[in-house]
Image: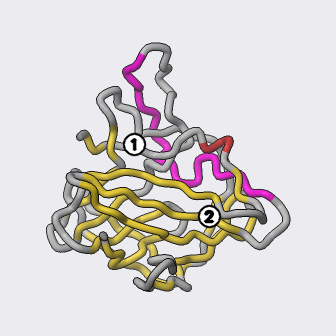
Amino acid sequence: MALAGCGGTTTKTVTATASGTTAASATTTTTTSATTPAGTTTTGTGAAPLATRSGSIDNEAITLSIVSLKRSGSTVQLTFSLSTKESDRAQVADAFDDGLFEKINSPGATSISGGDSLDGIYLIDSTNRKKYLVGRDSNNACLCDSDLGNGFVGSGAPLLLSATFGAPPVNSVDVFVPHYGTFAGVPIS
């Protein structure tokens, strides 16, 4: 499985409150530094989220909760939810995209296929000093939710999103989510 980013760009405002810095070395091709926003809660009990952080997307207050990080053979799947108590809707669009356009190698695909995706999220195995990018299939398509220009968070049920990565050889990793920072020590089940 190739580990590279997929994505596209559109302009949406995405912010989170920051109060500290966590540096994490990662070796696939780069060293990574990430800012850790305040207000992270980490739990490992029952149906409770593994980690939760408040921020904003599209100028709306949005809570991101890591629901699961599950190993299945040589991959792990990250599932997280976005929710709001506000009555307005927020468009996800490129909030979690790496901003790079990737050529998709399938009939009918364009060089900008797969935009507005989750490919800006990555895992950090600090024990082995490796960074795990969202995986890609044999056509170079992101193994993640994409076309998030059509993804909206509203006051109803949370919006669930997921991305698949190569499986690190450890029991927990740091999860970096653009604009929400690094969630440290998220357990892999």
Q: Amino acid at mark 2?
A: Leu
Amino acid found under the numbered disc labelled 1: Leu
**Residue 91 versus residue 172: which sits nearer the camera?**
172
Picture residue at 40% right of the left edge, 69% below the top: 34
Q: Which residues are magenta?
A: 89-106
Where residue 18 sits, quadrant-wise, is: bottom right
Q: Residue at x 36, y 75 (%)?
A: 186
Residue at the spot 16% in from the left edge and 64% down from the top edge: 169
Q: Which mark is residue 183?
A: none
Task: Count neighbours of disc 1 (C-alpha within 10 A) and say few if under 14, some if 14 to 19, many if 20 or more.
Answer: many
147 left or right, relative to 26:
right
Residue under label 2, please give it: 82
Q: Determine which of the numbered discs, if any, sits on residue 143 in the image.
A: 1
* Label 2 vs 1, first from the N-terminus: 2
Give the CA separation, mark 2 to mark 1: 19 Å
In-image side of 13 versus 111 (left or right)? right
Above or below residue 75? Residue 135 is above
